[in-house]
Image (spheres, grey):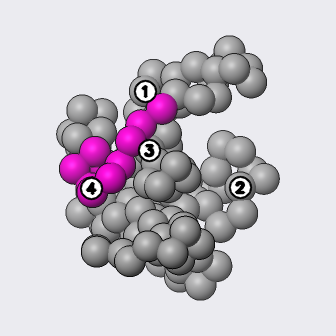
Amino acid sequence: MDLIEFREYCLSLEGVTEKMPFGKFAKRYDSILAFYILGHMFCFIDIEDFSFVDVRSTPDSIDDIKMCHSSVSRPINQSLKYWIQINFEGDIPDNKIYRLTEEAYRIVKEKYTKRIGLKSHT
């Protein structure tokens, strides 16, 4: 997997947008590219150090993933509740990383679709 492939995958999910919003907080975050659905972030990567992805998850999923894989850690921003960081060079295959990314997309989409009263189509 490479940066371009991962970015294209995220943008192929319906309604996804991208931003680099964190540079305004600190210069060291200028290279963080975040992906959004309905205006809310579901994953982000560092385009200068494409070695990990941080994805939204659920408490149960986080525990299960951590029990099965050693390449999972806390996200860059440790105040993000229910997020995990996945090392691309670890013991999680690319196809599972894509599934976890799509799961993050669905979690956020469902949460905010319900809040704004829209029907989800995925």
Mark 4 or 2: the one toward you:
4
Secondary structure of the residue carrying tag 1 is: loop
Q: Which mark is residue 13?
A: 4
Whether residues under marks 1 and 4 lie with C-beta atoms below 8 angstroms apart, the answer is: no
Relative vertical location of residue 29 with respect to residue 119 in this rendering, above or below? above
Q: Position of residue 48 (x, y in %)?
A: 45, 22
Q: Pick whichever, 120 or 3, lies toward us.
A: 120
Secondary structure of the residue carrying tag 2 is: loop
Secondary structure of the residue carrying tag 4 is: loop
Q: Amino acid at mark 2?
A: Leu
Which label's residue is closer to the chain start, 3 or 1? 3
The quarter in which the N terminus is drawn is top left
Whether residues under marks 4 and 2 lie with C-beta atoms below 8 angstroms apart, the answer is: no
**Residue at figure coordinates x 71%, y 45% from the top left:** 77
Span colored in magenta = 9-19
Q: Position of residue 96 (x, y in %)?
A: 31, 66
Secondary structure of the residue carrying tag 3 is: strand
Which residue matches tag 3?
A: 35
Q: Amino acid at mark 4?
A: Leu
Which residue matches tag 2?
A: 80
**Residue at figure coordinates x 28%, y 45% from the top left:** 11
Which residue matches tag 1?
A: 47
Q: Which mark is residue 70?
A: none
